[in-house]
Amino acid sequence: MTMTAWDADDPNTENAVLRYIIVKQSPNKPSPNMFYIDPEKGDIVTVISPKLLDRETLPTTQYELEIVAKDMAGIDVGLTGTATATITITDKNDHAPEFTHSLFQATVNEGWTGVVLNLTVDDRDDPATGAWRAVYSIINGNTGRSFEVQTNVDNNEGMLSVVKPLDYESTAFHTLLIKVENEEPLVPDVGYGPSSTATVHVRVLDVNEGPVFFPDPMMVTKRENVPVGSFVATLNATDPDFLQTQSIRFAVLRDPAGWLSVNPVRGMVNTTAILDRESSFVHDNRYSAVFMAMDNGSPPATGTGTLVIILEDDNDNAPYVYPSVARVCEDAKDLNVAVVGGKDKDISPNAAPFRIELGKQPGLEKMWKVTKVNNTHSQVTLMHRLQRANYNLPLLVTDSGVPPLSNSTDIKVQVCTCKKNKMDCSGADSARPGLLLLSLVLLALLSCTFTLVGGKIGGRFRASVQIQDAASPLLRLAASGRSRKLEDDVFVGPAS
C-alpha cells in the first residue's frame, strides 16, 4: 500500500519535504521487520520470505503499522505526523484437502438405501471459502452406480450413500476409491497428493428377502363361463436367498370377485366360480388378482405378484332395445315415431349387427313398420295415425352371436297433443294394448259372418255383432274387449 502525507508549508522549501518511517509493527512476530516503507514515496512492501508469509502459520492475519511522516527531509528538528496502516493477509488455495484416514469401513444391509459413512478431511485454507470447501468423487469401484457421495455443507464431510439397493448374493463386499478436491483450483505450485484419496470398504450383510414373482404381472387368456375348478395358471416365484435352502408357500392376497384359489405348494391357480366377462370387477376384458408368496426364513419374508386374466367373450347376454319410451304428435305429418337401438353386454362378434323387428303378434305389420338404419339402429314408423294415448309396441331384437340370442322388449309409444312447439302428453297416461286388439278385430271382421240383431230406436238402428267364427278365441277376446264400442249406434251392412 502507499501512505501519503500533506504539509501546508511552502512546497518549495524544506519545510514541506517529507520522509516516512515505520516506528512500530503489531504484532511483531514472526519478525519485527516484516514490512518496509520507502522514505520518499511512502510505498509499503513486504521484506519477509514468501514461505514465512503463510496465513495458516502466522499468529494473526492482520498487522498494524505505525507510520510517522517528518518534514525538513526527516532531520531531528522536523515536525511529524502519525498514521496507522492496517494490512490483512488473505487466503490462497495453497493447501490441498487431505483425508483424515487412508481407509474407511462401512457395513450395510442388503436391500437398504441411505447414508452409510461420513468421510472426514482436513484443509488448512480459510473455512467457508472455495479454497476450503470439498468436492468428493468416486473414481473407482462404483461399477453398478450403487453409491453416491455428497458434501455436507455444515462440516465439509463427505456423505457416502447407497442409492441402489445392494444384493448380498451378487456381491458381499465393495471396494471404492474416493477423491477429494476443492471448489477452487490450487495455486500452480501446489498439487493433490496421495492423502487426497481414500479407500472405502463396504461389507453387505445378508437379509432374508421375500420371494420374487416372474413374470409380474403374469398374463393368461381364458374364455368366460369355463367350468368351476378349471385350471388358470401356475405361479412362478423364486427366493433371492439362493445361498439358503428355503421353501415357498402361496396364498391369495386380493381376489376382488372371489373367483380363484391357489395350491399353497404348487402354485396352481384354479377357478372357484364362473368367470364373467361382464362383471363389474372386469375392466377392459381384464380381471386382476394379487397373490402372495412366503418363505420359511427367520423371520419369514413375503413377496406379491399380480395375475391378469384376459377374458374372451361368450354370447351369454341377450340384447335389448332402447329407449323404452318414444313420443309422437297425433297430428304429425311425419309418422316416423323414433329411432331405436340395440345394446348388448357382450362384445363383437356376439353383439352387433342387431336385427330389430316387430314382435310375433299377428297384425302388428298393419300398423307399424320397422326399417333398418345401420348395424345397431332401426326406424319405427306408424302406418296410420293414432288417437292420443299410450301404446305398447313389442319389438324383437336379435344379436349376431353363434347361436344368436333374442329378446322381446316393449317400448311405450306416447301419442301426444302438440301445439306451438309444445308437446302435451298428460292425457296419454294409460296404455292402450287395445290398439293391437282393435287391429285384430278389424282384420277378423273381414273374414267372419255377421248377424245383425237390433231394433229401431228413435229412427236409428241399435245393432250388436255376433261372431260366428268360434274357431278364433283371440278374436272373441278382442271383440269382448271392444264390446262397448261395437254396441254403439252403428249401421252394419251385409258381410262381404
Image (tube, rainbow, N blue to C red):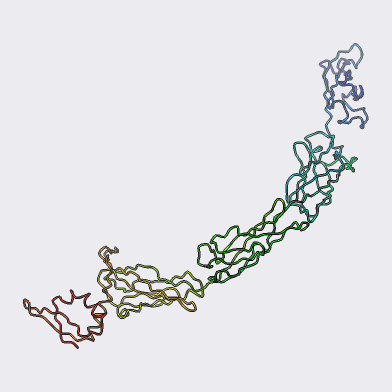
Give the residue at x 51% y 71%.
347
**Residue 185 location (% of width, % of height):** 83, 42
Among the 4 quarters of the image, the one containing residue 295? bottom right
Count of labels in the image:
0
Choose between 362 and 62: the one closer to the eye. Answer: 362
Give x and y (percent) for residue 162.
75, 48
Depth order, front residue of 72/476: 476
The image quarter containing residue 28 is top right
Which one is nearer the viewer's eye here, 355 or 226? 226
Locate residue 378 relative to residue 463 in the image: left or right. Answer: right
State the residue in front, 63 or 79.
63
In this rendering, is residue 414 above or below 369? above
Q: Is residue 304 left or right of residue 45?
A: left
Which percent across, then down, holds residue 60? 85, 26
Q: Reply above or below: 264 against 3.
A: below
Quadrant including the C terminus: bottom left
Q: Quadrant of residue 284?
A: bottom right
**Residue 447 in the image: x percent, y percent?**
23, 86
Above or below 67: residue 252: below
